[in-house]
Structure formats: structure tokens, C-alpha cells
Image: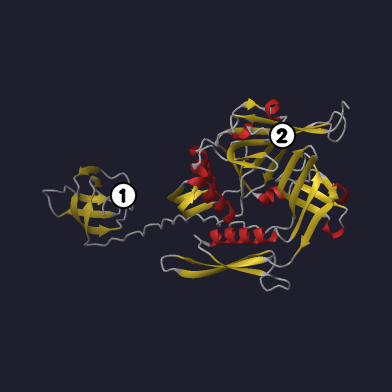
Amino acid sequence: MANARKAKPTVKFNGKNVNESIAPYLKKIVYTDVACGSSDSLDIVLQNVDMKWLNAWYPTKGDKIDASILFENWTEAGKNFTTQCGNFVLDSIGFTGGPLEATFGGLAIPASESFKETERTKTWKSVTIRQIGSEIAKKYGLGFCYDANKISIAKIEQSEKTDSAFLYSICSSYGLAMKVYRGKIIIFDKGKYEKKSPVTTITRKDFIDDEWDFKDTLTGTYTGARTSYKSGSDNKEISTFIGLIKENATGSRVLRINEQADDINDAKYKAAARVNESNESATTLTGTIWANPKVMAGVTITLSGLGKANGKYYVDQVKTTVSSDGTTQEIEIHKCQTRLVHVPATPAPSKPAKTPQKQPAKKKTYKVGDIVNFHGGMYYYSSYPGAKGYMGNAGPAKITKVNGSGKAHPYHLVTINWSKTHCWGWVNSGTFD
């Protein structure tokens, strides 16, 4: 049938298409797509009757594998979908007898084994998670994508940890998700993705042979957390609470945490992460469905036809198997719930310092007999306006009269040192001090 529904995998080894070479031997391809916490993987299972794969065709660990799956006429005639599985490094080679099979396993990690094998020790100071991820990605020639709020870290130790394990642990501690996909490290806020619209609806009839397992539990789930941490040079213990409801409210279930933290923001980020991670296990479902190319790790779907289990779910993992028996998906999903989110308090804007008002200088009063410093300039024959004036030198002088009858020049000065001051007459206010 020209329009038969089928799934066609495409596999490249070191950039070379090997579809025709492996077609007579291919038994199945299994692509495991993980939302976060570990690397995507690809398993290629081949029959090995003539032992070629264990002899001349034996691959080399570290080979690069590219894979995709074309879903032809999947939902209707002429409707095609392509799933890009990504780029992998051949990580494991296995053979079995009875029946003779070869299994080649690839991981979505950089070709450099040091990313997940070489332990390092480094102190990171005054950095953001974005900066740490970007630096590590650059080291291995990987792309980098960060889709989350800015989170700053005062100091963190990478103590004998691989870069891969270290970066995964940081993201986990602060409630972020991380995966390596198609040559890129991706760090994102899972809560942000849980809020996205469902891409499709899965019903009970979609599960093969009605194979599904639903669990709904209260054990290990929480409404909040109280964290105790030590801070400051005096190592003083500080306790802080964060929750969806008040700590002492009816139905409150509080997780008790003792954890290292830089400050109260750091403590609350980590507490929220612990609560959310635990709560993801509250309502879960696993099962096997006929493949739906819209179902991928990191998207949301609607579950229908299962009574109280119905609702919006986040896809944690999808294992797609393409074989002669059909194309199936094993899915692991958790129900989307209200997440505990820490929003750092915005410091109140500091009020601008008030400019001190300049106090008017107190007017100094002078009296007869005061010795003052004449600034130099005009002195007059009388205190009346229009009196004849003379030019005098600056220097010490004595006030001999105050408030002359003419008022125009109110002070009468007489020099006390003729070698410095030449002033004997009436002067204006402000011409001495």
C-alpha cells in the first residue's frame, strides 16, 4: 500500500548514511528521550548471524552517530512527522549468543570523555548558573541554551566531580532541569514548561493491551519546607520557611532541611527545589502506547478516559522503539501541580539623602573698640551719601564710631598700624571682618 503507515529510522555513523548497510541486520532501534537528569540514549540492536559485527564490521567506541525517525502517513495519508533523536557518541558495544545479536549504545554527550569521566576541583565565586553552564559548554565545544531566571551563587565548590555531574547537581539543587541534546547543553525551568499548553491528548485506548500503571500518593509530598542553615562569620544558625500554605495551617506538610546556604535567598531556592522534586512523584503514570511523534520529553499532554487520573501531565521520559513488531513508546509522566516558587525580595529603593539646608550665616554685630581686619578699598570723609572717598590699604583697624548719622557708611575705622593699613574714615558694612 502506497500510503501505509510506517516508521523509518535514519542512522549515520561519522556522517555517513548506513541505512542500506544495516537494513538486512536491523532488529530494532530504541531512542530514549529524557527531559532532564541524564543523557538521551540510542540503542541499535542488530542480528549477528554471520559474525560480521564482531569481526570486520566491529565499530569504534567514540564514533559519532546521528539518528532520526520519519513517521510516514502517521495520522492520515500524506501526514508525516520527523523526530530528530540527536547526536550521540558510541559509548558501549555488546554481543550475545543464542540468538547472535550486536547492541551498539550511544549517549548524547560530547566526544570528549573528560566531560563525564575526569574529576575536577575548582572553586567558583560570585557567579550565576548561566555563567557556570556557559563556561563548561565552551570547554567542550558545545552550544548552550539557558531558559530560566537569573540565579546568583556567592561561592560553590566543585570538589572532585566531573563537569557533567557538577553541572547536573547545581541545576538539581536550584530546581532547574538540564539535558544535552544535539551538541548543546540546555538548562531550563521545568515549572515554566509545565505551564505550556498540552501538545496532544492520550486516552485509555491509546495504551497497548491496556498497559498502564497509575500511582497517587501523599507520602513524600510537601506543602513547604523549613530550612536551617549557618551564615556569617559567627556561624550563627538561621531558620527560614517557604510554603504554598502557612506552616501551621491545616494539612500543612513541612519538609525539614539542614543545608549549606549563602543567605536566605539561597536557602529558599534550594528548599523550593527539594519540595518540587518530591512533589513530582505525587501523581505519576507509566505505560506503553502506539507511537505518537508529538509525545516528547519536556512537553505537556492531556490524559483522558482514566477517571480521577485525568488531567495535565508533564512528560519526563519517552522510550521510542522501532522494530518489525511495530513502533511503540514507553512513557513516564507526572501530573502538573502548583509548584513552590521563590521570588527574591526586591530591596526597597534607598531614599536619596537629604541635602542639608545651608543655614544662613548669623549676622555679626560690631561695637566701638573692636579690632577688625579691613579688606582694603574706599573709606569716606563722613557717613553721609556722596561723601568724598579715599583708597585705603588692607590691614588691622579699630572701630571708633558705629551708626553714623548719615547711615550710608556706618562704621568709622582708624588704623592701628600705619605701616600696613591706610584707613582713617567711614566705611561700608562688609568691608571688614
Comparing 105 with 281, the one in front is 105
- Residue under pointer 2: 26
Residue at 55 percent across and 34 percent down: it is 60
From the top left corner, tell me how far across and down residue 185 is, in percent: 58, 41
Quadrant in the picture for residue 67: top right
Judge by depth and name the residue closer to the eye, 328 or 339: 328
Toward the viewer: 214 or 360?
A: 214
Identify the residue under disc 1: 384
Find numbered disc 2 in the image and state the secondary structure of the residue it sits on.
strand
Residue at horizontal 46 percent and vertical 51 percent from the top: 126
Residue 205 in the image: x percent, y percent? 88, 48
Residue at 52 percent across and 56 percent down: it is 351
Q: Which mark is residue 159?
A: none
On the image, the x and y values in percent for residue 420 come to 13, 48
Cα separation, mark 2 vs mark 1, equals 123 Å
Mark 2 or 1: in front is: 2
**What amino acid is at disc 2?**
Leu
Q: Please tell me whether mark 1 sits on a helix, a strand or a loop.
A: loop
Left or right: residue 357 compared with residue 241: left
Side of 221 relative to 401 (left or right) = right
302 sits to left or right of 89: right
Q: Give the quarter of the image for residue 399.
A: bottom left
Q: Amino acid at mark 1?
A: Tyr
